[in-house]
Amino acid sequence: MGIRTTPTTPFAGQQPGTSGLRKKVTVFQQPGYLENFVQALFDVVHGVGQPATGLTLVLGGDGRFHNRTAIQTILRMAAARGYARVLVGQNSILSTPAVSAVIRRHSASGGIVLSASHNPGGPDGDFGIKYNGTNGGPAPETLTQAVYERTQALGSYTLSDAADIDLGTQGVQQMENTRIEVIDSVADHAAVLRSLFDFDAIRALFARGFRLRYDAMWAVGGPSAKAIIEGELGAPAGTVVHAEPLEDFGGLHPDPNPVYADDLVAHLMAADAPDMGAASDGDADRNMILGRGFIVSPSDSLAVLAAHARKVPGYQGGLAGVARSMPTSTAVDRVAKALSLPCYETPTGWKFFGNLLDAGRITLCGEESYGTGSDHVREKDGLWAVLFWLNLVAVTGQSVEQLVRGLWSEHGRCVYSRHDYDGIATERANALMAELRASLPTLGGTTVAGQAIAWADDFAYTDPVDGSVSQRQGVRVVLADSSRVVFRLSGTGTEGATLRVYLERHEPDASRHDVPAQEALAPLVALAEAVARIAHHTGMNAPTVMT
Ligand code: VG1
Ligand code: CO
């Protein structure tokens, strides 16, 4: 065994986006590409030339294609850097919330998640890498920006030339002076979940014949969902489907929304539908919840959990506060107001919740993109959300649909939809946003497509804990009745650009709560087209995906 330093030259574009560095697998397969990024990361975290003496690193991924190769490379680099310990998931697997749980329970200095989350996998699919800090949460922008700058200045990387670690069996192995512990991929996370929910009540619910269909989308959430829902909670075998993590997610998009989880939706709309449906994404941090014949919008899901949190053991003392990403609907704001709770509005991306959670200002948070979570870890957590819903159904005796309708009747319905325009040429997407931003100073007070715009801006966020400022987080166009359209470009894609258009309209009138969302939002769609000239810039007359 020996430690070798290899000369290298920078790769362009190693800039992390909303959630880590995501590129095509073929990009990550270039010699030195992963090594450069990890070297830059270690240089920033520990200081150039400084070893990671005495520290523990957590390492795992969502099992997608290239995961196993990349894990061995990072183990060699961690050993070369002098980490005391690396905790690595068995068979290279750790879901994103599991990494967060392991970091926190084992006092690690940080962790690396290999995932491109909801993006497709396989040799022609996507790969990704993300660093989480001591709190278990995604690195803040200051750190990811510093890593990017370091990738552009790098001259060499260092790694051990030791043989591969056997990741198939749990136990301790040694590489250089680093203790490599292959750990159970599920145990720590499961222990955290067990401490929060009334497993007896959920067990009794299943014993009464309650039927759930959990679609793990051939991704990393399958094993933990099976172990907990079928194993511990006694749901019948076959409750968790598509449970085996596949390197290419069966060729599908592991994104739990009504479009990509259409098989699950079909089951929940069928005549003999189960009582509840759920799905998680590639790295198991997202969740989708359905009732029988009923799809729950993620923004409503967050609001329902906030409204009923005290009924669940882990939150029976009440919530310190709540937060949502800016494009997420204001349903949770209405619940927070009624409960006199602080409510924060952050930019898109889980990293922005970290300071609020660490400072004890919030307990629950979520995003419109099927992400919900709490202060139990520092990532969104798919299985956590499903267990929360099961616990609520068990103790309230209400169905999923009844819980959502209860929210609507108390606070009105925040009718909501997101329209995505995928695969736009980057220059065209940038031109659309530039034109929109240029129109901002004169947009407020005008009437466009028959609708009076009250105000418009480009969302900027000042972190209330550390004072850091994030500019240009999305253009908001807001009407007098607080209906709004939000525009931003995705920061997780790997091909061209994706325009996201978020539409929200509050409907207080209960007799109109069953108007289909796309119909109720049609005037806002017209407004979006008129202010942003989407068809003109993108050449597309309809979104690629509507959720
Ligand atoms: C998307 C979502 C955002 C989410 C992010 C990571 O980002 O909109 O809400 O936090 O994905 O989720 P963007 O920049 O493409 O809109 V995951 O499950 O990929 O870790
Ligand atoms: Co994810």
Image (tube, helix red, strand yellow):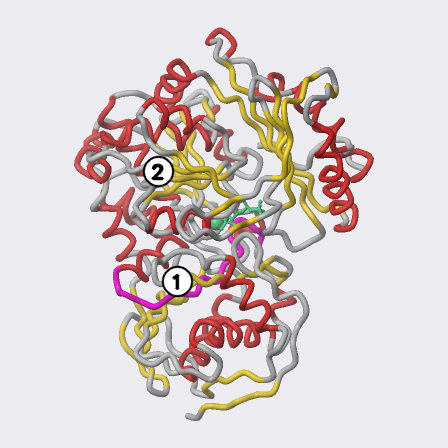
Identity of the residue drawn at 36% across and 79% down: 83
Q: Residue furthest bottom?
A: 2
**Magenta part mainly helix, strand or loop?**
loop
The spot of residue 344 in percent (x, y) is: 42, 37
Asked whether mark 2 and ligand 2 are closer than 8 Å, the reply comes as: no
Which of discs 1 and 2 lies nearer the camera? The answer is 1
Distance between mark 1 and mark 2 Cα atoms: 26 Å
Secondary structure beneath disc 1? Answer: loop
The spot of residue 294 in percent (x, y) is: 45, 23
Secondary structure beneath disc 2? Answer: helix
Depth order, front residue of 540/272 = 540
- Residue where numbered disc 2 is placed: 386
Identity of the residue drawn at 72% across and 46% down: 423
Given contact means CB atoms under 8 Å apart, are the residues at marks 1 and 2 in contact?
no
The spot of residue 252 in percent (x, y) is: 57, 47
Q: Which residues are magenta?
A: 105-120
Within the magenta stretch, is there residue 114? yes
Identity of the residue drawn at 50% across and 34% down: 328
Q: Quadrant of the N terminus?
A: bottom left
Depth order, front residue of 170/526 = 526
Q: Look at the picture and state if 453 lies above or below 383.
A: above
Q: Is residue 218 in sight in this rendering? A: no
User: Which disc is residue 133 wearing?
Assistant: 1
Depth order, front residue of 293/199 = 199
- Looking at numbered disc 2 in the image, what kind of residue is underneath it? Val
**Does label 1 or label 2 sit earlier along the sequence?**
1
Q: Is residue 255 left or right of residue 223?
A: right
The spot of residue 58 in percent (x, y) is: 36, 67
Q: Quadrant of the C terminus?
A: top right
Q: Residue furthest top?
A: 511
Depth order, front residue of 259/480 = 480
Q: Is residue 447 left or right of residue 462?
A: right
